[in-house]
Amino acid sequence: MRLAYSDRIARQFAIASMVWGVFGLSVGLLLALELALPLDLPPYLAFGRLRPVHTGAVVFAVIGNLVFAGMYHSSQRLLAVRLPLPRLAAAHFWLWQLAAAAAALTVPLGHSQGLELAEAEWPIDLAVALAWLFFAINFFTMVSRRAEPRLYVSIWFYIATTVAVPALTIANGLALPVGPLASVPLFGGLSGAMLESWYAQVAVAFFLTMPVIGIMYDLAPRAAARPLHSYRIAILHFWALVLLYGWAAPQQLLDTALPDWAQTLAVAAGLLLLAPTLAGVLNGMLTLRGTGARLRSDPVLKFIAAALFFQAIAALEAPVLSTHAFSGLTQYSDWIVGHVHLGALGWDGFMAAALLYWLVPRLWGVELRSRAAAGAHFYLATVGLLLYVSSMWIAGATQGVMWRAEDAAGRLSYSFIETAVALDLPYWGRALGGGLYLAGFLVMVANLMLTIRRGRPVDEEAEVAERARPEPVLSLLAGRPVVIAALVILLVVAAGTTNALASVGLLMVALLLGLAGAAASALGDRGAPSWHQRLEASGLVFTVLVAAAVVCGVAAELAPVMASEPEPSGRPYSELEAAGRRVYIAEGCAACHTQMIRPFLWEVSRYGEVSTAADSAGEVPPLWGSRRIGPDLARIGGRHDGAWHVRHLVDPRQVAFASRMPSYRHLLDQRLVLAPSAQAAAIARESGAPQGSKMVALVAYLQRLGQSP
Amino acid sequence: MTTDPIQGEIVQTTGGIPQADNRLPTWWLWLFWASVVLAAGIWLASAAFHVVPGPLDRYLAERAAALDTGDLVTGEMLTGLAGDKLAVRAGAAAFEKNCTRCHGARGEGNVGPNLTDPFWIGGGSPVDIYATIVEGRNARGMPPWGGELGRGMCKQVAAFILTIRDQNLPGKPPQGARWQPTPPSGAPR
């Protein structure tokens, strides 16, 4: 049977990825300069408002578009089927671009949900969910109509992406619309914070990892023209990631008000992820064996090898960062920024380059314009990445050490502003590294655009053998591996809920069961198709198992936290304070300020008593934050008078000589429609800010923080 | 079955991609099972047996130890701090903001005792004064300030009080016991 693939959609997504790449990386460079220079830019370009534009564009528009290009292209070939609904795919494409553009416009204008990495308001969330639905319809139709009897490794990863990412995006985005571009998220307090960390891990980190691994499993053997190193390692790699990713989500909430058990579970799951991730890296690297000199000359192979190498470094770093000892030092510091960029620029960015250098010449039926330029891109990207990440390691370690330094009398050695001054050099290093990386990206875009101009769109054709597709077998759901995995998970969950001695026994049984299962599959009959080979013949059963695997971690950890959510106590926010909180969210203050004092003596000395779950009860959305470019604000209320706050917000450097904070002078002129209140009058009188201005509301909110009435 | 010279036997071809079926190296197996055992151990030690205290418990223990044993706070430190102009100024500012209502604008006493006479209810050593500020004297109506001001600030307030003591300003009549410094044993006079 002759098959003509429908590749227009892959061409569209590939070009969109490049266009958004130039935008997203440029915004990143601007942000780096804003921290290095303190620039006084118009309020819409201030760091707090622009950082969500950078993260959103890079994750969803650059990597997102790239992943869709890869998945549409590779699925048709791996499943031996033509894209069934090209028009729906086109609708997916345009909806995705529209959502990305709308998010990039509305968030800087102050329409933010206040959820990190999900700032865009509900109509955009809706568009994203719809776009995912369009993709899922096309993708699962391809799976069910395929001519290839079994699903290749890459397809497993695409299934996991298509199941988990939209589900978590929707759960996290659940909100009550209260206006065309305003809403109240459904979950607040501890559950809200926990859901957000799940979203960050299972939607964002998962999205930056799983489909790209799928693309790697397709691209590495094809580009190298070599067989995949190991089928069995692929099975282990896939299921370990799917089963463990959700459990490790609270890694980023160590030492917060999250219950201890959830933190411990995250540390343990983070440790368990190390070996499987390294196994996947090995599988990719060893597939490239035997390519010899091509590894140096072929840009595709070169970028894949480097991407795998950077993923190995990130994989080694992750479980270390998620120990209590290290997290105390690096949490909220620039180290974390370095870690995520190692993943985003090193793994995703290098895989993006590999895929584009592979796809573009094939989709336009022409040779790559310049291999030398691709080589230059490789060096610019590598040097830029290493400079970026090492600058952030230095910055993060500097912050971590200076924040906790105490002199012999137990006094903090450095004021916050002194710790900020110490970052001048690393921040310039980061801007330079990011600039080099962007320069490399521009070289690639120019190279690929020139390539496209010389070619013309080609839809590849292939001879496909029509083979019988086995019937789905529901009995696979009761196969030995499923039973063993389910038992192990049940035993582990049971161990978490019984007394200490019983839990030792249960964990021992779980460990032995796991060992027995591993041994049984290693000794299994090699002649007949294995359980997993039969599973690959059924897209439906496979999808069901993937969904169950993803859900169990989320449910087991999230449900107890939601059940133990403390009731809000104390006086609710006044209308003025609530309005101030909305200003805080719209200005993106949470991009630089946390509201979470961790249980360390030095943090308590600096910021006040440890934050508890009760502190964020009823906070919708919780504003714990993830980074301290500025100090923690959980208990800032009452520490300064209103006049100080206004002076500081209008001209931060007049109060703190080397502050990196932008000026919020515009809040003096922007009005809020609120009923006049005694509180507003008092703050306006004390601070000198015009009554009815946003400034008064923000000061009222700041003065309320940490003040339990 | 075909065989690849590097990857060995090709066990299957799916989606046009031939696949070998190599095993993981032995070091990987050790790493994996060690991480499984370690993860279970971490869970048992922290969550089941509480051998390793959670972050909040660890903090509370550290704080109690720091306050009890005076590991962090010694008389010499506080006396030294009383000679540090910046610390005293910060302490004075906090005193002015939080303490003057009860202890008078210059520490001469009001509802609370006179801080400028040699009589002290909770002991007059620098560490006693510091501890009184941090923990308060609930029975007598003095609130604890350790949480509100932070330990660092409490030390600076204690340092400020060390600079105003023994001025004998007219104010509230003496309360508590007379306190006199005893030279540390064995220290050269």
Image: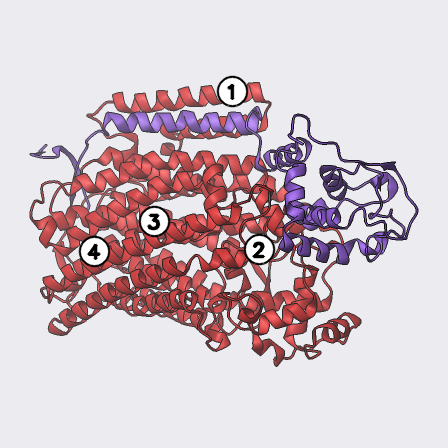
Chain colours: A red, B purple
Provide residue A86's location: percent of width, then percent of height. 28, 65
The picture quadrant where one finds residue B143 is top right
Tell me the subunit letter for badge 3.
Answer: A
Residue plotted at (45% across, 33% down): A268
Same chain for labels 2 and 3? Say yes or no.
Answer: yes
Bin the neighbour count of mark 2 within 10 Å (Cα to Cα): few under 14, some 14-19, many 20 and up. Answer: many
Provide residue A331's location: percent of width, then percent of height. 48, 47
Residue plotted at (24% across, 66% down): A439
Q: Which residue is mark 1?
A: A504
**B132 up-or-down from A57: above or below:** above
Going by the numbered disc 4, the residue's amino acid type is Ala
On residue A209, the disc is 3
Which quadrant of the rendered structure holds the C terminus of chain B? top right
Going by the numbered disc 1, the residue's amino acid type is Val
Local SS, label 4: helix
Q: Which residue is mark 2?
A: A632
Bin the neighbour count of mark 1 within 10 Å (Cα to Cα): few under 14, some 14-19, many 20 and up. Answer: many
Local SS, label 1: helix
Circles 4 and 2: CB atoms closer than 8 Å: no
Provide residue B81's location: percent of width, then percent of height. 64, 46
On residue A11, the disc is none
Residue plotted at (23% across, 46% down): A217
Provide residue B174's location: percent of width, then percent of height. 90, 43
